Amino acid sequence: MILRPVEGIPEGLTSRAQSFVSRHGVKVEVRPVEDHRQWWLERGIPAGLIDRMTAYEKTWGGLHLPPAPQYEGGPRYFYPDSPESDAAGWWFEAGAQRAAVPFMFMIGPSNEFGIHGDQAGWVPLHSTIEGWVESLALADHASTWARRITRLVGDEVDGIDVSDYEPVREVMGLADTWWRGSDSLVALYTGEAKALAFPKARVALVYSGLDRWGLHGSVATDS
């Protein structure tokens, strides 16, 4: 496995996420998707899906980032593979698991980033891969600046009231969301609970004791 520095940070990220990728990301050498095109076409994979996989690989392929707080760290590195479909459309694997988990990391029919489990099937976590990367960057930032981090699991999550919080829009959350209060950030992770049909797998991380810098960081446009 050959590692090299990241060159050319993907567009569409906040300055906080760009800094995170440049400081902590490395690139792994991967085989171009185009090398598999003819093999996939012969097996009935649509050319449009292969085009999507190729675009994903050119932007994100081989990018290795620090582990996520949940999902046993997320993909080891980004690389499209294993196209599959059902009545809703076509998916492809976003990257192989970092650890043994009962689901795959997938890019959905509308380019959502999510997981596919054995129980409930497809659960989109973020509306784009950029949202997932933004969530990693925000978790890294919040854990650095918070005075206290509280972890709540299962039914404990029901006690969190975010009615006075604002959504952190750059993470483009679906099953997983971030919320910003006056001095705290709250990350809600429900994807695994939905994918495995196991509500007790819900997790919330509350990062408290944050000043304005801790709440936002170096984001070009606050959400």
Image (cartoon, rainbow, N blue to C red):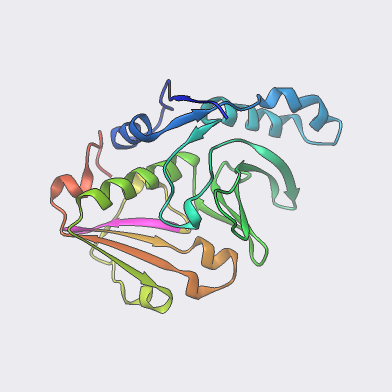
Please determine whether, in this image, residue 30 is positioned above or below residue 99: above
Main SS of the magenta part reads: strand
Q: Residue at x 70, y 31 (%)?
A: 50
Left or right of residue 39: residue 104: left
**Residue 111: x, y in percent?**
57, 41
- Quadrant (top left, top right, bottom left, bottom right) of the C terminus: top left
Instruction: Give the extent of the magenta segment.
Output: 176-184
Q: Residue at x 25, y 37 (%)?
A: 219
In the picture as drawn, the residue positioned furthest to the front comes out as 1
- Quadrant (top left, top right, bottom left, bottom right) of the N terminus: top right
**Residue 9: x, y in percent?**
41, 26
Number of numbered discs visible in the structure rendering: 0
**Residue 16: x, y in percent?**
29, 37
Tell me if residue 183 is in the magenta stretch. yes
Between residue 44 and residue 81, name the one nearer to us: 81
Tell me if residue 61 is in the magenta stretch. no
Q: Residue at x 38, y 33 (%)?
A: 21
In the picture as drawn, the residue positioned furthest to the right comes out as 42
In the picture as drawn, the residue positioned furthest to the left comes out as 211
Quadrant of the rendered image containing residue 35: top right
Please determine whether, in this image, residue 70 is positioned above or below residue 109: below
**Residue 213: x, y in percent?**
16, 44
Q: Residue at x 50, y 49 (%)?
A: 74
